[in-house]
Image: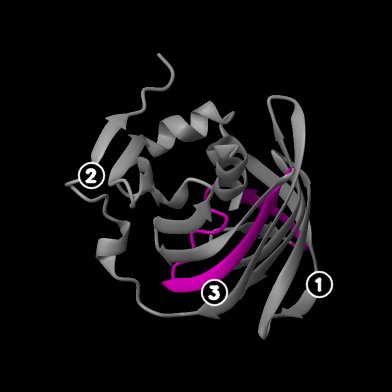
Amino acid sequence: MKLRHLLIVMLVALGGSAASAQMSIALNALDLVDAKVDYQADYALTSGTQHFHGKVIHAPARERWEFTTGSGQQVLLLRRDIDEAAMLWPERRWYMSTTFTMMSNLLGGLGTDVLHGRESGIERLDGETVTRYHVDKGAFTGDLWRSSDGILIKAVGVVTYQGTPTPGELVLSNLRRVKADPSLFVRPQDYFGIPLKLGK
């Protein structure tokens, strides 16, 4: 599994603030999908030739992405609130972690990149009324579909990392606005892990 591809798309996809002037928008990539509401959904993610699907659980500044690979179930915890990113292997009770900031920096500063684009219409997706945005400048270029309460329902486009473009698509389905259990975002204390030291 190319974990980097998964992280790139999820980082561009982890945020709800937007500054708008008429039809133009400037979106901070990291704030893009940090909706101010709790929700759960199924997701399908394609990044390059890699395909993932599973469940995402969101609360402001916290996300849990569950998926299964050949090595079993895995969980990615993204915690902006405590500046931590951790990959968990529940079946082995093992984890690897680093800071959220360091992970973003490793991926070319995607978390602080500003995406520029414009609104391009109102549509219906999976029973939701969403605003479509076309982004033509930034680490991500393509189209984004967001609900009125800031949930990123769909993203289709290209992420450029260190000069290399990677096509990607993220689609949420079966969206449910339910309160997230805070314990789902906590790395278990009885897991064995090795901190991932990135950078200097």
Q: Quadrant of residue 22?
A: bottom right
Q: Is residue 150 magenta?
A: no
Q: Do the CB atoms of the residues marked 3 and 1 lie less than 8 Å apart?
A: no
* Drawn side of residue 20 relative to residue 37, left or right: right
Looking at the image, is mark 2 or mark 3 earlier in the sequence? 3
Write down the residue under mark 3: 149
**From this viewpoint, is residue 194 visible?**
yes
Residue 162 image offset from top left, x and y in percent:
68, 25
Closer to the chain start, of discs 2 and 1, is: 1
The structure residue drawn at horizontal position 55% and vertical position 59%, both measured from the top left corner, is 33
Q: Is residue 30 magenta-colored? A: yes
Residue 161: where, in percent of width, then height? 68, 31
Helix, strand or loop at label 1? It is strand
Task: Using a 10 Å C-alpha cutoff, classify the residue at mark 3 as few (fewer than 14 neighbours), some (14 to 19) or many (20 or more).
Answer: few
The residue that disc 1 covers is 121
Q: Which residues are magenta?
A: 22-48
Q: CA distance from mark 2 to mark 3?
A: 35 Å
The kind of residue on which mark 2 rests is Tyr
What residue sits 69% from the left and 52% below the top?
Answer: 46
Q: Secondary structure at mark 2?
A: loop
- Amino acid marked by disc 3: Asp
